[in-house]
Image: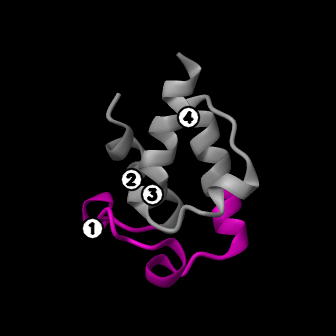
Amino acid sequence: MDVEKKFKEIVADIFKVKAGKLKGKTRFVEDLNAKSIDLIALIAATENTFNITTRREETAKNRTISQSVAYIRKKLRSLK
């Protein structure tokens, strides 16, 4: 599974942007104008899509697409 591609599709759906315009350095709050409800939806969709559970303290550190993708990959590795 291409984690980055799938995550960008989730982000694109929630924030109503084209997945192709999303870059690793894209910031949720500053670039996508994310509100807390958007971030909650993003976390829920990510958990459901990748079948992982996250902790608020950990996900709060993820400010960009790249940080989130790295976090998801780390969580997926810990499941193996």
What's the residue type where badge 2 is placed? Lys
> How many angstroms separate mark 2 from mark 4 (CA)?
17 Å
**On the image, which quarter does residue 49 sit in?**
top right
Residue 67 - label? 3
Relative depth, front residue between 57 and 52: 57
Q: Within 10 angstroms of label 2, few (less than 14), some, or many (20 or more) residues?
A: many
Magenta stretch? Answer: 16-41
Query: Residue 5 occupies which quadrant of the picture?
Result: top left
For the N terminus, the image quarter is: top left
Mark positioned earlier in the residue sequence (1 or 4): 1
Q: Are marks 1 and 3 in contact (CB under 8 Å)?
A: no
- The Cα–Cα distance between marks 3 and 2, rounded to whole angstroms, is 12 Å
> Residue at point 43% right, 81% down?
31
Whether 75 is drawn above or below 34: the answer is above
| Amino acid on which disc 1 is placed | Lys
Determine whether the residue tagged by mark 2 lies in a helix, strand or loop: helix
Identify which amino acid the numbered label 3 is placed on.
Gln
Name the residue carrying label 1: 21
Pointer 1 with pointer 4, Cβ within 8 A: no
Q: Are marks 4 and 3 in contact (CB under 8 Å)?
A: no
Q: Is residue 35 left or right of residue 72?
A: right
Q: Residue under circle 2?
A: 8
Q: Mark 4 highlights which residue?
A: 75
User: Of 14 and 74, which appears nearest the observer?
Assistant: 74
Mark 3, residues whose alpha carbon is within 10 Å: few (<14), some, or many (≥20)? Answer: some
Considering the numbered disc 4 on the image, is that residue within a helix, a strand or a loop?
Answer: helix
The amino acid at mark 4 is Lys
Q: Rounded to the nearest whole Å, what is the CA distance between mark 4 and mark 3?
A: 12 Å
Residue 63 drawn above or below residue 8: below
